[in-house]
Amino acid sequence: MTPTATGPGPGRRDRKKRQTRAALTEAALRLVAERGLAQVTVEEISEAVDVSPRTFFNYFSCKDDALVGDQAGHAARLVARLAAVPPEVPVLAALRTAFDEVIDEIRAEPELWCLRMDVVTRNPALLPRLLAGNTEAERAIVEVVAARVGVDPGHAYPALVTAVTGAVLRNAMTRWAAHPDRPDLPDLVDEAFAAIAAGLPEPDRP
């Protein structure tokens, strides 16, 4: 018998898993935005999606993980994209190219990302988990950058360029989320990268 006759194939199961994970994330963010971090339980998040708490823990180790997002997944995709950029491309341009996939994910769900940024801002208890994920991602990027420029990962340059470009993306996202007209995120990222590449000149005085 064919897979269609016996039941859903792996593709359909994977889509269902992604849908469930996304629904749990959205429910967690919306509930915490409404009530605050301490006033929302895993049971309430699960009930909002009509799944059991056991199902919730199939996707997340705790409530905080559902709120801060799939940092490990984002980092892995970013590192893979960076490693795939031809070695002759300068580091700043390579990192800007690598950010395209992350930017596309944000643009695909702008309301969700803005909600996540708002929740994290208003609930500082989430910051340690967010920072831990960022640290792991930056460590992986540092190793790829070091290999690109032919230096040891302990050299100052890979860590510095990784930290600076990470700050560029965060700054662009903050400006994007705060602007009522939602300017195009890639334009804001390009503007910030151009400023860094130019040596961060002071803006013209009015």
Image: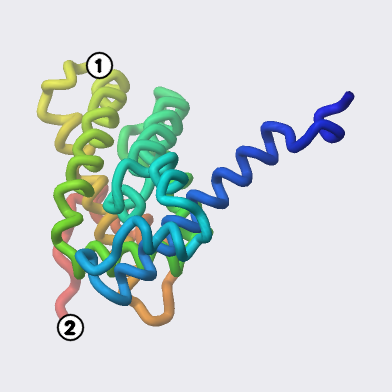
- Answer above or below: position of 147 versus 165: above
For disc 2, the marked residue is 206
Dot 1 falls on a residue whose secondary structure is: loop
User: Could you tell me if residue 186 is visible in this image?
Assistant: no
Query: Where the N terminus falls, by quadrant?
Result: top right
Asked which quadrant contains residue 142, the reply is: top left
- Which residue sits at x=23%, y=36%? 138
For disc 1, the marked residue is 150
For disc 1, the neighbor class at 10 Å (few under 14, some 14 to 19, many from 20) is few
Q: Position of residue 186 (x, y in %)?
A: 43, 58
Camera-near label (2 vs 1) is 1
Separation of residues labelled 2 and 1 (CA atoms)? 43 Å
- Which residue sits at x=27%, y=56%? 170
- Answer above or below: position of 112 versus 67: below
Query: Where the C terminus falls, by quadrant?
Result: bottom left
Give the amino acid type for the residue marked by disc 1 in the picture.
Gly
- Answer above or below: position of 142 versus 95: above
For disc 2, the neighbor class at 10 Å (few under 14, some 14 to 19, many from 20) is few
Q: Position of residue 116 (x, y in %)?
A: 34, 63
In the displayed structure image, the side of residue 85 where residue 193 appears, left or right: left
Give the amino acid type for the residue marked by disc 2 in the picture.
Pro
